[in-house]
Image: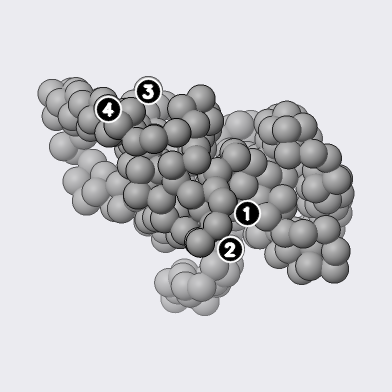
Amino acid sequence: MSAASTGPVSGGPAVGPRRDVPSGAMDPETDQSLVFVRRELVLVAVVLVALARLVTTSDAFLIAGLLPVVMLLAGMGVVDSAQPGSRPFEALLLPATLTGGAGAAIHVIPIGLGLVPALIAFAWLLDRALVLEMRLAAEATGPTESDRSRALLAAVVVAFVAFTGIAALVPGGLVQTGGAGDGSSLSGGWLILLAVDDALIALLLGYRVAVFRYGTARDAARSAVTYAIVVAVAAGALRAVGLPSLVGPAVLTLVFYLWDALHGTAPARRREPRFLWETVLLVALGIVVVLWNQRLPG
């Protein structure tokens, strides 16, 4: 048995023994043309995220919303070049969400030298996410369970960055212990925006991990909706609890991961009747959370 057929090594989304690249596909880490365009895309994304730190928080909402669109448009040719005829939209959901989330989360860091390691970390994460997706696009036999695990790990990291970014831009979203910005200072309008944005992030990332489990885009989309509802409910509940600093985004990330683990245990049970009742229950929980928040001051 060749070394390429050995099992994966844990520790990162794109770390481990390299599988043989199918005929007609190019390896994103050895083919010089792919390396060049990938690094060029990463460089552009890093510059845009750095520039996003220079704008005000209110303008950062618009910038953070546009960055994923820019990544989708600019990255389609990069992913498609790894395997012509692939589905670049799905493959770019992780990099696009990471870029938008980083454009928002960068506002947590004060302007100064502290931005340098943050931008370097973003560049590395984005590069690894692109390598992972380009390699998955080149798979001739379809994704394996190892591929799904790597994609889930990448999605969890992206979720934390994006949830942190949303909380950083929403006034009162990041609770400061012993100071202003506690959970009760988050007004109703901002709470709705926080929950909706967190739900959108969970929808995109949930769809990306669900496509590995379901045979059709329709089933994956239905599964992604449940990710969005669960995270939106959790975001509303966390506002009432008022968890300090980055604990809130971390708990939302844990909720995302646990919900995926629940779905991953038995894909067959996510069929018609059970899926419907599951969604109804989540909506009911959402109503309870909304009523709970209405009883809080502010």
Say whether disc 4 or disc 1 marks the residue closer to the N-terminus.
1
Residue at 77% in and 32% down: 59
Mark 1 crowdedness (10 Å alpha carbons): few <14, some 14-19, many ≥20? many
Q: Name the residue under label 4.
A: 291
Left or right position of 26 against 111 = left
- Amino acid type, mark 2: Ala
Residue 188, position in %: x, y? 46, 27
Report, in whole angstroms, how far the alpha carbon at label 1 lies from the one at label 2.
7 Å
| 75 or 184, nearer to the observer | 184
Q: Are marks 1 and 2 in contact (CB under 8 Å)?
A: yes
Label 3 to label 2, Cα distance in Å?
28 Å
First in sequence: mark 1 or mark 3? 1
The amino acid pointed to by label 4 is: Leu
| Residue 8 horizontal/vertical position (percent) | 46, 70
Q: Where is residue 3 in the image (x, y as percent from the top left)?
A: 52, 76
Tell me the quarter of the image containing the C terminus. top left
SS for callout 3: helix
Task: Write the residue at 30% across / 31% down.
Answer: 295
State how far apart marks 1 and 3 are (Cα). 24 Å
The residue under label 1 is 129
The dot on residue 14 is 2
Front position among marks 3 and 4: 4
Q: Who comes first in sequence, dot 3 or dot 4?
A: 3
- The kind of residue on which mark 3 rests is Arg
